[in-house]
Amino acid sequence: MTIHLPEDLERFVQAKVQSGRFASEDDAISEAVRLLRLAEDRTGAKVGGETSSAEPAWQRLVKAVGTIPDAVFDRIPADGSAQLDHYIYGSPRHPNS
């Protein structure tokens, strides 16, 4: 296999080989591909922002929201009326006023 890299990436690979991090350019590219495969296996995401069909985004969102402690949600007004009152009246309305 022959690979053609942009000049900046080629210089980067060569610098890593010269620094002793990798024994050869082939070793450096092999490690890069292994890391890419590992990242895609872990996240289900593909390079360029594409997502795999492994799990829909809405399911990932539901899981993420499920990790938020209930105490956080308890501080949010259910109907948002307190926030609306703040914008309309400039300060929170008091029930006795």
Image: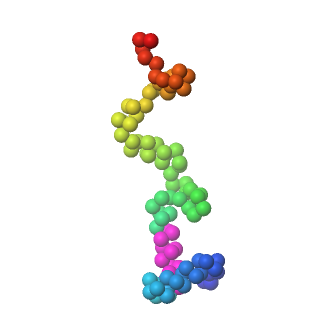
Residue 70 quadrant: top left
Residue occupying the point 48% across, 77% down: 31
**Nearer-the-camera pick, 71 or 44:** 71
* Image location of residue 9, percent across then percent down: 59, 77
- Quarter of the rendering occupied by the C terminus: top left
Q: Is residue 32 a member of the stretch shown in magenta?
A: yes
Question: Furthest-top residue in view?
Answer: 96
Up the image or down, 35 lies above or below 51; here it is below
Task: State whether residue 4 appears in this view.
Answer: yes
Q: 19 or 2: which is nearer to us?
A: 19
Q: Is residue 26 visible?
A: no
Residue 26 picture location, percent across and down: 52, 84
Q: Which residues are magenta?
A: 25-37
Residue at figure coordinates x 42%, y 14% from the top left: 95
Quadrant where the N terminus is found in the figure: bottom right
Observer-nearest of 71 and 88: 88
